[in-house]
Image: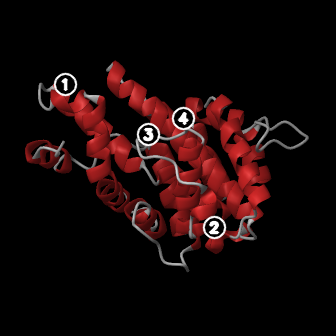
Amino acid sequence: MALSLTIKRLLSNQPAELLVFHPVAMKLQEMLAEENFTIEEVIRLINDDPSLATQILKMANSSYYGGRARVETIKDAVVRLGAQQVSNLALAVSQASLHASDNPVLDRFMTDLWHHSHACAVGCRWVAEHAGMRHLTEQAYMSGLLHDVGKLYLLKAVERLTKNGVATVALEGEMMLEIFAELHAEQGARILRHWSLPELYCSVAADHHLASCAPDNQVLAIVRLVNAACREAGLSLSSEPAVPLTTLPELAVVGLSDLECAELAVVLEDTRGDEL
């Protein structure tokens, strides 16, 4: 089924300001990118949104992040994890709340998309840690989290259009998958650039479905590998058949062993129970 040019034009021309990011989380990213902030400013900004602060503390105390002592305040979280990791957590937990819709068809897609994005983020961080790339763990995490943000944008655009009585045909499952395949990489990169996020994340969003990637782009290789692992684990919206990780060229770039690939599958499976 060829995607109608009318639907494609309508979706491609939706405003970049559609709600796909939390304003506090974006302010944190901007603050840290400019490198002209104090820890007190980070803490104050997060505490201005009690709901967001609560979710960050919940995540900071999860088994994945938690240390021996319980984190009781945002200040404790920043001291333990660092401002960058707390900022990335803020974006992650706020993203979870945005993956919801009053429309049951769109809500199902958004829920599945969140499970995929969260699993991919956790998996990318795990791979960076276990492949001798610890200096890339936060970049890998964020790249995994945001690589499919174009799909969330398109879902929000379809939601907006259908509420206005337009593009109701896009609510069919097959049509949504076709829309994703044609538009999500292009639209994801557009949205990330609109919000002035680092070019690394923009290029990952744009290129994670290319036939091949540059061998020197380690973060992109990680995302492509984990994306494939998510598909193999059934944590994906894609209707394409899973490809065995051992056949992927990204494996040589990343350098995971067969045993580590098996461990990655367990890490991804464990994310199914995560509630943000």
Amino acid identity at mark 2: Leu
Q: Is residue 271 left or right of residue 67?
A: left
**Which residue is rendered at x = 46% and y = 46% of the image?**
241
Amino acid identity at mark 1: Lys
Q: Residue 47's image quarter? A: top right
> Which secondary structure lies at badge 2?
helix
Return the x and y of residue 276 as percentages of the image width and height: 61, 31
**Mark 1 or mark 3: which is in front?**
3
Mark nearer the N terminus (1 vs 3): 1
Residue at mark 3: 237
Mark nearer the N terminus (2 vs 1): 1
Residue at mark 4: 49
Question: From mark 4 to mark 3, how far is it between C-alphas?
Answer: 32 Å
**Which residue is rendered at x = 62% and y = 74% of the image?**
253
**Which residue is rendered at x = 42% and y = 32% of the image?**
110
Residue at mark 1: 163
Spot the residue most to the left. 6
Q: Is residue 102 visible?
A: no
Return the x and y of residue 74 as percentages of the image width and height: 70, 41
**Mark 2 or mark 1: which is in front?**
2
Mark nearer the N terminus (4 vs 1): 4
* Dot 2 alpha-carbon crowd within 10 angstroms: few under 14, some 14 to 19, many 20 or more: some
Of residues 82 and 132, the one nearer the viewer is 132
Return the x and y of residue 212 as percentages of the image width and height: 44, 71
Amino acid identity at mark 3: Leu
The numbered disc on residue 251 is 2
**Mark 4 or mark 3: which is in front?**
3
Question: From mark 2 to mark 1, how far is it between C-alphas?
Answer: 44 Å
Spot the residue most to the bottom. 216
Question: From mark 3 to mark 2, how far is it between C-alphas?
Answer: 22 Å
20 in relation to 260, above or below: above
